[in-house]
């Protein structure tokens, strides 16, 4: 989100809502499983803000779906290779896995690759970032969903706010996502809450 204050000058932040991303990713898997089943969570590095916020969002979603049971939460550290190792260990211990909630696309793709290598069918898997390989996996029906988090859009949105503050109301934003609402409402660059 971005915040502005006329009295104090421009104070802005544009970035992803990691809590909401975690929540929506978990909801997608829970809905696909009709609210019942065993899920594995693949998370980023402990201590990172994105990991913590995505964890909180996932926990909130799982609280809304009491029939979904978190059987393991594994640190994949944003790595497809680490996610493959975690899945290999879980499969070797005969865990019954109905779905995967991955905090980024690389881990989701690694987990799905390990399922393939183990001769298993893919399970409903959702992730975050919207990288091209994940988008293709969604189109191929292998990945349930990925949430787009585009740093270029976020950067251009931030520049638009700065330029509006420097140039004034005649400045027209460069980022097209103001028009479709992805960055929130432009409101002449003076709105007090803009959501990514």
Image (spheres, rainbow, N blue to C red):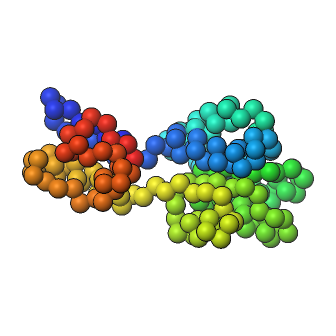
Query: Is 112 situated above or below 194?
Result: below
| Residue 100 screen position, x and y as percent | 71, 52
Q: Residue at x 64, y 48 (%)?
A: 28
| Residue 48 screen position, x and y as percent | 52, 43
Q: Residue at x 58, y 35 (%)?
A: 56
| Residue 89 screen position, x and y as percent | 82, 56
In screen coordinates, is 186 left or right of 27? left
Would residue 104 be seen by someone viewing this image from the given angle? no
* Residue 172 quadrant: bottom left
Q: Residue at x 49, y 57 (%)?
A: 148
Would residue 179 be seen by someone viewing this image from the given angle? yes
Q: Residue at x 9, y 47 (%)?
A: 168
Q: State the quadrant of the N terminus.
A: top left
In screen coordinates, is 14 left or right of 128? left
The residue closer to the viewer here, 65 or 39, is 65
Query: Is 116 situated above or below 157?
Result: below
Q: How many marks?
A: 0
| Residue 31 screen position, x and y as percent | 69, 45
Query: Is 103 situated above or below 113?
Result: above
Q: Residue furthest top?
A: 7
The residue closer to the viewer here, 85 or 42, is 42
The residue closer to the viewer here, 43 or 132, is 132
């Amino acid at each position: 989100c971005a915040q502005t204050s006329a009295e104090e000058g421009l104070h802005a932040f544009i970035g992803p809502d990691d809590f909401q991303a975690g929540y929506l990713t978990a909801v997608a898997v829970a809905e696909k499983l009709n609210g019942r089943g065993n899920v594995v969570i693949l998370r980023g590095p402990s201590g990172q803000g994105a990991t913590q916020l995505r964890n909180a969002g996932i926990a909130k979603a799982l609280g809304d779906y009491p029939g979904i049971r978190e059987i393991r939460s594994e640190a994949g550290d944003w790595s497809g290779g680490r996610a493959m190792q975690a899945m290999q260990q879980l499969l070797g211990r005969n865990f019954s896995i109905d779905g995967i909630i991955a905090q980024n696309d690389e881990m989701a793709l690694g987990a799905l690759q390990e399922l393939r290598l183990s001769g298993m069918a893919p399970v409903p898997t959702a992730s975050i970032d919207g990288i091209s390989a994940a988008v293709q996996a969604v189109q191929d029906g292998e990945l349930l969903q990925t949430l787009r988090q585009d740093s270029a859009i976020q950067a251009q949105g931030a520049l638009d706010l700065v330029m509006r503050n420097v140039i004034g109301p005649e400045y027209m934003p460069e980022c097209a996502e103001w028009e479709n609402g992805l960055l929130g409402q432009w409101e002449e660059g003076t709105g007090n809450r803009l959501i990514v």
